[in-house]
């Protein structure tokens, strides 16, 4: 089974400062079609998860451009260029390459310092 | 607009059965897989399984195989998650979400969640 490991698990950030979350998979996430099915989700307090990024770096509609994704193979990163108050919540990476099993990371809780 | 609307909160006793629902609209319900995700109180997200509504092909995470049943009724664009005998450890929020997009379908749109509480 593919294991997704995020770090840090807790991320206190000052408003306006950047933030970065790492996600590592136990196996390569490159699919046979050449694409990498690594997604990032945001879950604000009391809300359903919302997808931010798909295939490593593609932003979903309505996602601010301060969110960006990078990485390849087994190592991936979510970056927020300048944290805003509305970014508070838990961030999850999720692999969808090893179909049909989808696997989430443990989650990273972002809070304002 | 893609929407997934889930059934309301449930309070059940251990040993009881339960079926919760997820109704899709705004897209071709039979063309995309619907997945289910569990979130236990204060914990992270766990993918449980998914179903292709057009032919009811269901796939399960090994962790949930045999513990729940995923089904669908394409005539009313609704997917279901059911338990035959609930345990207190089934207390959680359950989300349905569409696996959409090109290539390997990924979770994109989510329902609002159904809170299931199992307590004696």
Image: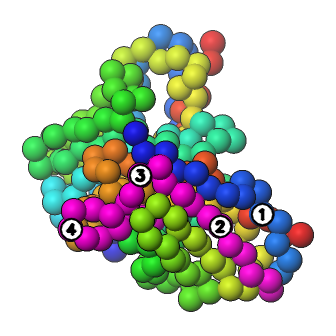
Would you name the residue on which mark 3 appears? A27
Q: Nearer the viewer, mark 1 or mark 3?
A: 3
Q: Nearer the viewer, mark 3 or mark 4?
A: 3
Instruction: Depth check: give the residue in front, A14 or A32.
Output: A32
Chain letter of the residue carrying label 1: A
Disc 2: CA contacts within 10 A as few (<14), some (14-19) or many (>=20): many
Which label's residue is closer to the chain start, 1 or 3? 1
Relative to A81, B83 lies left or right: left
Q: Position of residue B65 (x, y in %)?
A: 34, 26
**CA gap, disc 4 and disc 1:** 35 Å
Disc 1: CA contacts within 10 A as few (<14), some (14-19) or many (>=20): some
Q: Are marks 4 and 2 in contact (CB under 8 Å)?
A: no
Q: Are marks 3 and 4 on the same chain?
A: yes
Would you name the residue on which mark 4 appears? A33
Task: Find the magenta span and give its range.
Answer: A16-39
Residue A21 badge: 2
């Amino acid at each position: 089974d593919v294991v997704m490991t995020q770090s840090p698990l807790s991320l206190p950030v000052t408003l306006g400062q950047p933030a970065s979350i790492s996600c590592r998979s136990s196996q390569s996430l490159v699919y046979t079609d050449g694409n990498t099915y690594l997604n990032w989700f945001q879950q604000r307090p009391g809300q359903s998860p919302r997808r931010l990024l798909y295939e490593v770096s593609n932003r979903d509609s309505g996602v601010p451009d301060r969110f960006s994704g990078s990485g390849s193979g087994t190592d991936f990163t979510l970056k927020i260029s300048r944290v805003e108050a509305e970014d508070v919540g838990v961030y999850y990476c999720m692999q969808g390459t090893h179909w049909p099993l989808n696997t989430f990371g443990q989650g990273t809780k972002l809070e304002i310092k | 607009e893609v929407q997934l609307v889930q059934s309301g909160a449930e309070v059940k006793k251990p040993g009881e059965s339960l079926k919760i629902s997820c109704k899709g609209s705004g897209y071709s319900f039979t063309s995309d897989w619907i997945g289910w995700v569990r979130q236990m109180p204060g914990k992270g997200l766990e993918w449980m399984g998914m179903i292709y509504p057009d032919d009811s092909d269901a796939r399960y995470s090994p962790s949930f195989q045999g513990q729940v049943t995923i089904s669908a009724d394409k005539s009313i664009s609704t997917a279901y998650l059911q338990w035959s005998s609930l345990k207190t450890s089934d207390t959680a929020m359950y989300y349905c979400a569409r696996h959409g997009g090109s290539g390997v379908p990924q979770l994109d749109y989510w329902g609002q969640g159904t809170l299931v509480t199992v307590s004696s």
